[in-house]
Amino acid sequence: MRFYVLTLFTEMIEQGLSHSVIGRGIEKGLLSVEAVDIRNFTEDKHRRVDDYGYGGGAGMIMQAQPVYDAYMSVKNRVKDGARLIYMSPQGAVFNQKKAEELSKAEDIIILCGHYEGIDQRVIDELEPEEISIGDFVLTGGELGAMVLIDAVSRLVPGVLNKEESFEDESFSDGLLEYPQYTRPYEFMGRCVPDVLLSGHHENVEKWRQRQKIINTFNKRPELLKRAELSEEERQLIEELKNNQHGGFYK
């Protein structure tokens, strides 16, 4: 999978994605991340890529021409069907389902805005898919682009050390993950649940699934409306509702 990030801050992308899982994926040849400097495509001798907005208002606007030419420099090198994404607070909020969809693409081009945004005419011309990482404002799109690349990359076969390591993570089935424990057995009077020491894999899986339901009910109950649940799991949710006294359940 190949990512191309159109940005004013190439070092931010290159340094931020050169470590951990993404860095190993790049070393294995399963991923590539190229930061494309939009400033290299400006026609201004001072490498300026922004100007004051028509109609007044605070802040500067990124000009259409450098953005368009930066995009075309990548488009001319990739296969047809490359996904173009614009990191924008006006876009649909990114989630695991979108990450899974994007993980099947070969080439993803990500446009990062800055200042007060990008001249709308180039957005209308390129018609990118607009994606947000949440209902808040960042200085630029680079952090959002790195979040998207990380979430998508870990779903590419071979990037993670174990194929199953993402299957039981939060949101993989619409639910939050179950609690995790490691040594020592006791910490500050709290012990590891005995079922995890039993060696009975079926019971362990049942316990984990139950904990996923309880965790989601306690922390993100709105997710349960969209999750695919068995009849037994629905009954558990009803029990939790009937015994609700304002606290967390275990």
Image (spheres, helix red, strand yellow):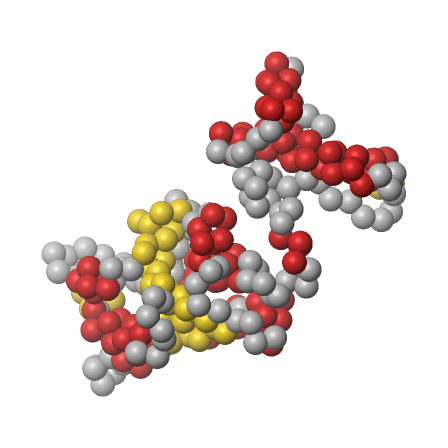
Q: Residue at x 87, y 38 (%)?
A: 198
In the image, residue 97 lies at what x, y percent?
A: 47, 48
- Can residue 125 be seen in this snapshot? yes
In the image, residue 14 lies at what x, y percent?
A: 49, 74
86 vs 212: above or below: below
Q: Residue at x 62, y 27 (%)?
A: 233
Q: Is residue 154 left or right of residue 81?
A: right
Q: Residue at x 32, y 56 (%)?
A: 129
Of residues 40 and 148, the one nearer the viewer is 148
120 vs 167: above or below: below
| Occupied quadrant, residue 51 | bottom left
- Can residue 59 be seen in this snapshot? no
- Split into 4 quadrants, where in the image is the C terminus? top right
Q: Is residue 215 left or right of residue 49?
A: right
Q: Residue at x 57, y 67 (%)?
A: 22
In the image, residue 190 lies at what x, y percent?
A: 83, 36
In the image, residue 123 lies at what x, y percent?
A: 23, 61
| Occupied quadrant, residue 191 | top right
Q: Is residue 201 left or right of residue 221?
A: right
Of residues 7 and 99, the one nearer the viewer is 99
38 vs 85: above or below: below
Furthest-left residue in this view: 55
How many numbered discs, if any? 0
Q: Is residue 79 left or right of residue 143?
A: left
